[in-house]
Image: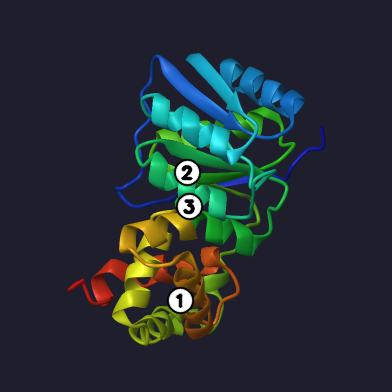
Amino acid sequence: MAVASAERTTEVSCSMRDIPTTALTALVVDDHPLFCDALALTLRSIADFVDIQTAGTLEASLDKVRSEDDFDLVLLDLNLPDVNGLDGLVRLRTAAPKSTILIVSSMADDRMITHALKAGADGFVPKHSQRAVFRKAFDAVRAGHSFVPDGYIDPKGQDGGRDAPEEALTRLASLTNQQARILNLICEGKLNKQIAFDLSIAETTVKAHVTAIMRKLGVHSRTQAVLIAQEARFNRVLPSDM
């Protein structure tokens, strides 16, 4: 395996999930069985994990989360056969709000790491990192810190980042009440068919609203819409009289 860059930790809010110190459980989500086995061996070498399960797709991981108590730790690859990018993270975070989620991915550029943390990840470990990096990542999140690779620079720290929340608020305020309802449900990880059922409308109507939402927010994917909503504390700024 290639050696990833060194690592560092950052402080996070008090909402960080706590990891017990004994009798740990974990879920490894990756579509490569050999890599799943390698990650499982790595976890057993760095802490007292009594149960480590694996899943090759997002749907399989969601089934395991629904049928089990919350896993203490979830290792999630962003590229899976049934999902790509951050959509899987958003849905898994909704399904397992108490679990600590570490992204293990080869897509480790600064912007992706930033978006992953905003979408609910507790840390980000570049794929093919050495065992020592995983140990430090685990120790960091257990201590109440997030974990990012060394050299990571938050794009929001660059010039012009301060106006992003205000711009997000302005864009969100342009949504209609029905679009606000649908965006709320998208933030919960629901698919168009589920949204149509919840709101008693046609799925084609939902698709039309989703297209309008993305156009108003100036984004090209549902995940980007979710990130904007989270950044602007969506539930606090949009109409709640639904």
For the residues bearing labels 2 and 3, Cβ distance under 8 angstroms: yes
Amino acid type, residue under disc 3 in the picture: Val
Q: Nearer the viewer, residue 41 or 188?
A: 188
Q: Residue at x 53, y 63 (%)?
A: 223
Q: Nearer the viewer, residue 23 or 71?
A: 71
Mark before the other along the chain sequence, 1 or 3: 3
Q: Position of residue 16 (x, y in %)?
A: 36, 44
Numbered tag placed on residue 139 in the rendering: none
Q: What separation in Å lies between label 1 and label 3 (alpha carbons)?
A: 20 Å
Residue placed under numbered mark 3 in the picture? 90
Mark before the other along the chain sequence, 1 or 2: 2
Label 3 crowd (10 A; few <14 / some 14-19 / many >=20): many
Q: What separation in Å lies between label 2 and label 3 (alpha carbons)?
A: 6 Å
Quarter assignment of residue 75: top right
Residue 153 visible within the image: yes
For the residues bearing labels 1 and 3, Cβ distance under 8 angstroms: no
Q: Is residue 10 above or below residue 142?
A: below
Query: Does dot 3 land on a helix, a strand or a loop?
Result: helix
Q: Is residue 136 above or below residue 89?
A: above
Residue placed under numbered mark 1 in the picture? 209
Q: Nearer the viewer, residue 48 or 105?
A: 105
Indicate which label's residue lies in the foreground, 1 or 3: 1
Q: Residue at x 32, y 69 (%)?
A: 181
Q: Residue at x 65, y 45 (%)?
A: 82
Numbered tag placed on residue 92 in the rendering: 2
For the residues bearing labels 1 and 2, Cβ distance under 8 angstroms: no
Left or right for 80, reference 235? right
